[in-house]
C-alpha cells in the first residue's frame, strides 16, 4: 500500500502519475506521523466524562476530524498508519474513523470538483481502500470489542454511502485515471 514513487524522476511522470505520489522525504514524514498516531492512540487513555474539565480532545477524535476534512497529508499519514500498524489498532477505532470519512465523503468529492484538485480525494480513496481490507475481511490480529457486531451494520451502511457518492461523482473525475483506478480497487 506504500505510495512512494521514488524510482521515477518527477519530470518524467505524467500529470496523473504525479497526482498522489510522494517524495522520499514525504514518505519518511508520513511514516513518522503514522508512528506518532499509533503511539498516541495506543498509549493515551481517554478521559472520562466525569472529570471536571477535559483539557484537550483525545487524539482519536482529532484524527477523525482531520480525516473528515479530506486533506491529503492526513489521509496519507492514515494510509501509513493502517498499513504499518493495523495489528496494534482496535477494530472499533477503525470503524470510528471510517464513519467520520463516510459522513463527509460527499463533501470531500464536491470540494475536489470545485477546487479541481483531486489529490485529497485520491488519498481519501486510498484510506478507504486500506480500511476496506481491515473492515470487510477478517484480520485475526485486529483487536475487537464486544459491541462490535452491532456496529458492523453501520459499516455496511457506510460502504453504501461511499458507493452512491462515487457513482454520482464518477463522471466529473473520470478523466483522472489515478482516482478512477483507486475507486475500482475499493469496489
Image (spheres, helix red, strand yellow):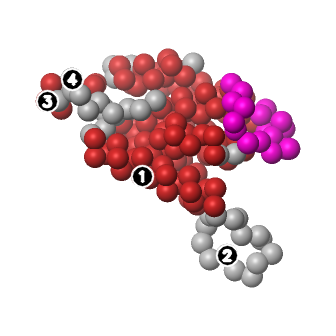
Q: Position of residue 178 (x, y in %)?
A: 37, 23
Q: Which residues are magenta?
A: 137-153
Q: Which residue is mark 2?
A: 54
Q: What is the CA distance from the residue labelled 3 to the residue labelled 4?
A: 8 Å
Position of 97 compared to 84: left or right? right
Answer few, some or many: residues within 10 Å of disc 4's Cα (few below 14, many 20 plus, some between 14 and 19): few
Q: Which residue is mark 3?
A: 11
Q: What is the CA distance from the residue labelled 4 to the residue labelled 2?
A: 49 Å
The image shows residue 110, relative to residue 66, as above or below, that is above
Q: Which of 164 and 3 lies nearest the eye of the viewer?
A: 3
Q: Position of residue 67 (x, y in %)?
A: 52, 47
Point out the tag, 4 or 2, that comes first from the N-terminus: 4
Q: Residue at x 62, y 77 (%)?
A: 55
Q: Residue at x 27, y 25 (%)?
A: 17
Which SS does the magenta portion mostly show?
loop
Q: What is the CA distance from the residue labelled 1 to the residue labelled 2?
A: 27 Å
Q: Which of 152 and 159 lies nearest the eye of the viewer?
A: 152
Quarter of the view holding residue 110: top left
Q: What is the CA distance from the residue labelled 1 to the residue labelled 3?
A: 27 Å
Which numbered mark, 1 or 4, is in the foreground of this view? Answer: 1
Q: What is the CA distance from the residue labelled 2 to the residue labelled 3?
A: 49 Å
Position of 70 compared to 95: left or right? left
Mark 2, secondary structure of its residue: loop
For the view shown, which residue lies furthest in the bottom direction? 52
Q: Residue at x 81, y 40 (%)?
A: 148
Q: Position of residue 116 (x, y in %)?
A: 32, 35
Q: What is the CA distance from the residue labelled 1 to the residue labelled 4?
A: 28 Å
Q: Are marks 1 and 4 in contact (CB under 8 Å)?
A: no
Q: Which residue is mark 1?
A: 32
Q: Are marks 2 and 3 in contact (CB under 8 Å)?
A: no
Amino acid at each position: 500500500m506504500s505510495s512512494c514513487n521514488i524510482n521515477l524522476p518527477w519530470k518524467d511522470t505524467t500529470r496523473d502519475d504525479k497526482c498522489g505520489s510522494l517524495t522520499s522525504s514525504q514518505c519518511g514524514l508520513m511514516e513518522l506521523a503514522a508512528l506518532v498516531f499509533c503511539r498516541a492512540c495506543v498509549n493515551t487513555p481517554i478521559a472520562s466524562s466525569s472529570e471536571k474539565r477535559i483539557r484537550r480532545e483525545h487524539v482519536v477524535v482529532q484524527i477523525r476530524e482531520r480525516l473528515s476534512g479530506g486533506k491529503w497529508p492526513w489521509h496519507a499519514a492514515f494510509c501509513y498508519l493502517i498499513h504499518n500498524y493495523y495489528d496494534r489498532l482496535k477494530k472499533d477505532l477503525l470503524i470510528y474513523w471510517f464513519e467520520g470519512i463516510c459522513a463527509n465523503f460527499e463533501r470531500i468529492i464536491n470540494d475536489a470538483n470545485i477546487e479541481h484538485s483531486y489529490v485529497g480525494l485520491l488519498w481519501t480513496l486510498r484510506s478507504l481502500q486500506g480500511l476496506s481490507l481491515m473492515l470487510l475481511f477478517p484480520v485475526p490480529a485486529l483487536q475487537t470489542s464486544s459491541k462490535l457486531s452491532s456496529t458492523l451494520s453501520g459499516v455496511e451502511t457506510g460502504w453504501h454511502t461511499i458507493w452512491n457518492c462515487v457513482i454520482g461523482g464518477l463522471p466529473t473525475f473520470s478523466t483522472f485515471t489515478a482516482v478512477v483506478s483507486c475507486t475500482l480497487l475499493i469496489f
